[in-house]
Image: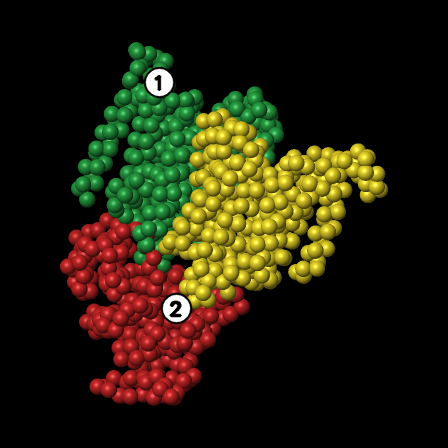
Chain colours: A green, B yellow, C red
Amino acid sequence: MRSNKVKIIIMLLLIAVLTVLYVFQDLNGSYHYALPRRLIKVLAMALTGVAIAYATVTFQTISHNRILTPSIMGLDSLYMLVQTAIIFIFGSMSVLILSQMLNFFISLIAMVVFALLLYHFMFKGDGQPIYFLLLVGIIVGTFLGSLTTFLQVLIDPNEFMNVQDKMFASFNNVNSDLVWIALLIVVGTIAIGWTKLKELDVLTLGRDNARNLGVNYDGVVRTMLVLSAILIATSTALVGPITFFGLIVANLSYQFFNTYKHSVTITGAILFSLIALIGGQWVIERVFSFSTTLSVIINFIGGIYFIYLLLKESRSS
Amino acid sequence: MKKRYLFIALILLSLLSLFVGVTRISPVDLLDFNSEETQIFLISRVPRLVAIVLAGMGMAIAGLIMQSLSRNKFVSPTTAGTLDATKLGILVSMMIFVNATMLERMIVAFIFALAGTLLFMQILNRIKFKDAIFIPLIGMMFGNILNSITTFFAYKADIIQNLSTWMQGDFSTILKGRYELLYISVPILIISYFYANRFTVAGMGEDFAKNLGIGYKRIVNFGLILVALISVTVVLTVGVIPFVGLIIPNIISIFKGDNLQKTLPHTAMLGAVFLLFCDILGRLIIYPYEISISLMVGVLGSAIFLVLLIRGRAYAKQ
Amino acid sequence: MIAVKELTKVFGKKKVVDTVNVTIHPGKITSFIGPNGAGKSTLLSMVSRLMNADSGEVLLDSSDVKAFKSNEFAKRVSILKQSNFMNVRLTIRELVSFGRFPYSKGRLTSEDEKMVDQALDYMNLVEMQDSFLDELSGGQRQRAFIAMVIAQDTEYVLLDEPLNNLDMKHSVQIMRILRRLVDDLGKTVVIVLHDINFASVYSDRIVALKDGRVVKDGPTNDIINTESLKDIYDMNIPIQEINDCRICVYFDSK
């Protein structure tokens, strides 16, 4: 697949150009103030992009499906509930909101524990179909959502602005210490997962065929589920929820690279997400000076793309 | 589950609902027509009861019709994007027609609800992998997507909290003059009873229906129109009430099978009983405050749905 | 040699496989036959470790199959199930290359490539090796999956109803290839079959199951007779000998 290498190189160049544009355009010599801030922001975007792309592609392989994302398993809903509950109970001036570090770890731990409990409960027997797990997750998510709505209605409208800020992922005001911590988590998680990529390739053949070929199917599925939950939780705790972002980049990558090899599709999805995030942020901040946060637009586009995918799938059959 | 017992439960819970509340009202007070108690009774309590009963029956029947037509036990307004499409419709009507009347809002919301449900049924019709659990998963994801579109516009218009208030299912705001739209569901319930046989036949598939000389497409579309109408009236007057359309028909189906003409009255009554139960509980738990019906139904409903799911799987394994 | 000892599997309250004892003879084709729901596929799944038994054991060269490492087991026993649903577009060659996974973990050596070439050649797939699986007919796709199992190069090849949805021509083609696998390459083939006449003509041994129990087990010629078939299928089936093949005439025109 020589052509895929060329594609990857072109995408890398594009990312480099976008990054340079984003970091240096209108910098006006502010090397001490604006430059480090912009660099941290780029790093935050890169981390989010890598985490979401990697988690979504592996998750879709495990679930034998290309129209699901790990965020729907109730992780986003839980994050919103945690944030709403903190503001509801302690108020927006609470240390839990003001200290980003504390907030990050509370959200991260809540989401990871939630995912682990869900998996633990669901994988008691052998050969549990994954859709069952997902449906249970999404129902628990709906339940958490109704709790959140209930609290939101009760919250003082002035305080609500703080909740609303948390509803949408934002790369502004990302704490630089947090970015380094998140970097450690993401790199560590992906390093563990990278050794399993070849086995993921085999997983695409289905459970029976994979086991025939000597792959510990259930073991790989569980490991990858935990890893993708950790990645999504990290990215959500760092910048907030972008539920449908992974859906877009993963499917773009499948279409663009047309291979079963995860080393390629995951790399492709990561590159697409970097282009979308850095490029999108550049367009919004420098070109249009929009007030909207990028994630609202991404979710909007991701939503429409999902409906397109569903209709396309039905037409092709 | 006998019809008689359901009916008795419905009457008992209705009476309870009429006499539970912050203002103590005893039946004796009602003898004096001009007393304050009688006024509260007529302006607040009776409308609330009627609203709960109609909403419960309506949502349960809407779910029953959808499950029959889609031939999937886990399809309902909650799991097919209908409620979310309604929400989007209401938002659009709020933004574009700022001074719209209730009826105008209803028409806009109805168009959205119908379009959303039709879209989902189209997807369902032609999707390759028809797993009983995969379909509601796709439906709920579809709903989430519609929600994200709603959020996008609400964010632009800065009315997210307003929208939350609007959408939260809540019977405490039901007063005389603000719930009458729900009466639309009365003729719908009656019509669906007369069409029950045709829905049952349509539920057995297009070829089967054609063989019996029934216009399949027409019946399906007609059923979906009824579903959209019910959903819209409920969401507009009360707010989003999840899960009722999902769990009630499933419970009745376990006991009574899937012949709509036979199960429709049971489903309607159990829907009303369930909603009354949730409402009364919500009023008592943190008395004198109220827990909204959305939350009560969300908690009880999701728990019951999980039980149904796990039960269904154990059943399928044998 | 594979030996099945007292193997039992329960679904709900039903014993799908009920204390089964069977020996798989090396270098032969063994067919599992029997009515619907007899437990043939379940038995095959347990032998190949796709499914865990509730009690009893399966011995491969007198050690329990559960004791093998997944990878080592995959070099000795391969299984092909009926349903092969996939949502990834793979070419035939890519699929067949997966057969080498137990050896190379996805990094094919030149040795592996040679095995893949041989498997493709064996199944007459060389010319279409770059076609995508979803563009193939049912028979071609089945051949591609069998080629994958051949590339896996195991002593034991287990197949669950490989003739399902195939027309007569392709069914015969596949059975001939299986015959060659045994006669030329010395493999051992175990196959679940629905059509009794394929079992009669192509297999060396037959194991007949009914309600989860083994009702007959022996060389093909000992099983294919009216008397034994009555015990298995509760039908009166006359046997006709044509060109040294015993054909069961189970059609009843009256």
Q: Is residue A153 left or right of residue A317?
A: right
Which amino acid type is shown beneath numbered disc 1?
A: Pro
Q: Could you tell me residue C212's position as x and y percent? A: 45, 74
Q: Give the secondary structure at mark 2.
A: helix
Q: Quadrant of residue B285?
A: top right
Q: Residue at x 75, y 36 (%)?
A: B40
Q: Is residue C161 left or right of residue A138?
A: left
- Depth check: give the residue in front, B209 or C49: B209
- Depth check: give the residue in front, B147 or A36: B147
Tell whether label 1 touches label 2 (CB within 8 Å).
no
Quadrant of the image for the N terminus of chain C? bottom left
**A102 lies above or below B219:** above
In the image as oriented, which residue stretches furthest toward the left? C127
Q: Chain of mark 2?
A: C
Q: Quadrant of residue C138?
A: bottom left
Q: Quadrant of residue A226?
A: top left
- Depth check: give the residue in front, C235 or B125: B125
Q: Chain of mark 1?
A: A
Q: CA–CA distance between discs 2 and 1?
A: 64 Å
- The disc placed on residue A36 is 1
Which residue position holds label 2? C41
Q: Could you tell me residue A48's position as x and y percent? A: 38, 32
**B89 lies above or below C139:** above
Q: Could you tell me residue B128's position as x and y percent? A: 37, 55
Residue B239 visible in rendering: yes
Q: Is residue C252 left or right of residue B93?
A: left
Q: Could you tell me residue A246's position as x and y percent? A: 37, 38
Quadrant of the image for the C terminus of chain C? bottom left
Q: Residue at x 60, y 39 (%)?
A: B237
- Depth check: give the residue in front, C112 or A18: A18
Residue A84 visible in rendering: no
Which amino acid type is shown beneath numbered disc 2?
A: Ser
